[in-house]
Image (cartoon, rainbow, N blue to C red):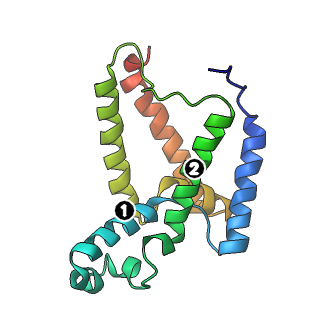
Amino acid sequence: MREARPYASPYLAGVGVGAVLLLAYVIVGRGLGAAGAVSALVASGVAAAAPAHAASNATYAPYVGGGAGLLGDWRVIEVIGVTLGGLLSALAAGRFRPRVERGPRIGAGGRLGYAFAGGIVMAFGAKLARGCTSGLALSGGALLSAGAWLFVVCAFAAGYAAAPLVRRQWT
């Protein structure tokens, strides 16, 4: 396997994310965010199994009403693009190595269990808040929303507060 290239400059990457966000507003008329893709996927599954229920349900109807299908939802296309872009970037930089990142005091199964549990909590929170953290932080922050900036500060504070609780897993 070839030697991995160095990571990109975080400043250059930040400018790139900002440019993508600006283009999303200009071209699509919306900011970035991924939580709606999961809702669209679930709604499509419900519509496939019980079309009448999906059409009459206030939660699923907005996702299945247009008739464009799962690939007609811009958030699904966004998530597919992010996934493929990340894969291509890792391959091009020589950094694609399937493995479970973990500390010395936790096994791969435990790490995946914590990741799954954290994902469930984040998904519940995103649905409850009607949007994901990335959409709020990036899109709301770019619009100078006071709520978005307050959220970012609180999210970082919560991360710092929780770090001592899980630090022993990584050291």
Q: Is residue 29 above or below residue 122?
A: below
Q: Is residue 93 left or right of residue 133?
A: right
Q: Quadrant of residue 55?
A: bottom left
| Residue occupied by mark 1 | 127
- Give percent across and percent down for residue 37: 44, 63
At mark 1, the secondary structure is helix
Q: Tell me what residue is drawn at x 52 percent, y 57 percent.
A: 79
In front here: 158 or 90?
90
Residue 10, how many percent across, how many down? 72, 37
| Depicted 29 relative to depicted 128: above or below | below
The residue located at (37%, 19%) in the rendering is 169
Q: Is residue 49 above or below residue 8?
A: below
Classify 66 as above or below 38.
below
Instruction: Tell me which amino acid carries mark 2.
Output: Leu
- Classify the position of the N terminus by image quarter: top right
Residue 139 at x, y percent in the picture:
62, 61
Task: Tell me the crowding category of disc 2: few under 14, some 14 to 19, or many 20 or more residues within 10 angstroms, Cα based.
Answer: few
Mark 2 lies on residue: 84
> For the residues marked 2 and 1, what is the alpha-carbon distance in whole angstroms?
25 Å
Q: Is residue 140 left or right of residue 165?
A: right
Q: How many marks?
A: 2
The circle on residue 15 is none
Q: Residue at x 57, y 52 (%)?
A: 82
